[in-house]
Image: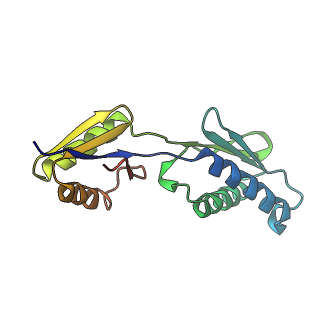
Amino acid sequence: MAKKQSFDISTAVDFQEVDNAVNQAIKETQTRYDFKGTTCELDFDREAGSVKLEADDQFRLDQLVKVFREKLSRRQVPLKNIDESTVDIGSLGRARITMGFKSGIDQETAKKISKDIKANGFKKVQVQIQGDEVRVTSASRDELQSVINFLKPRDYGVELMFGNYR
């Protein structure tokens, strides 16, 4: 019997890198001219996996979000995994937004990935949903490489990571 080869499809966010991006964004807002004399806040809640951004008005909040996204992308945090809430305008025109981070593939996305793999007709490839990740198994490493190449350009709303290849 041939040995089975497999790999896992998952998604994750390194919260230490998010924390570093928050600190860098705070430093940049303290030195930028368009933020002088304003109170812009970034608050990272590691337990909830979210960042609360607050600024004096809608324009400054948009600039703050732009700076924060830039810092995240430079730290290789996948921007597809950001789940933004709607902008909340408070009293005196203060604007705030909460950005959550997706870790793990939800059931709907996992079913969609599994369905796409099965519909493409890969030979002797089995797909299993295991909690928040998907395991793909086959006897041929070439088939597994074909599955990876098939999934890479597709958009499932999260950044797919292929690991545990054995």
Q: Is residue 125 above or below residue 34?
A: above
Residue, far bottom? 33
- The location of residue 148, given as percent across then percent down, is 28, 57
Residue at the location (21% across, 56% down)? 141
- The location of residue 33, given as percent across then percent down, is 84, 68
Q: Nearer the viewer, residue 111 or 128?
A: 128
Residue at the location (20% across, 49% down)? 117
Residue at the location (34% across, 55% down)? 155
Q: Is residue 130 above or below residue 19?
A: above
Q: Is residue 115 above or below residue 61?
A: above
Residue, far front? 1
Residue at the location (42% across, 49% down)? 158
> Quarter of the image containing the N terminus?
top left
Asked if one can make out residue 60 in the rendered structure from this viewpoint, the answer is yes
Q: Is residue 150 left or right of residue 97?
A: left
- The location of residue 74, given as percent across then percent down, is 61, 64
- The location of residue 113, given as percent across then percent down, is 27, 45
Q: Is residue 28 left or right of residue 157?
A: right
Q: Quadrant of residue 153?
A: bottom left
Q: How is the image coloured?
A: rainbow
Residue, far right? 37
Q: Is residue 104 left or right of residue 117?
A: right
Asked if one can make out residue 85 in the rendered structure from this viewpoint, the answer is no
Count of marks placed on residues: 0
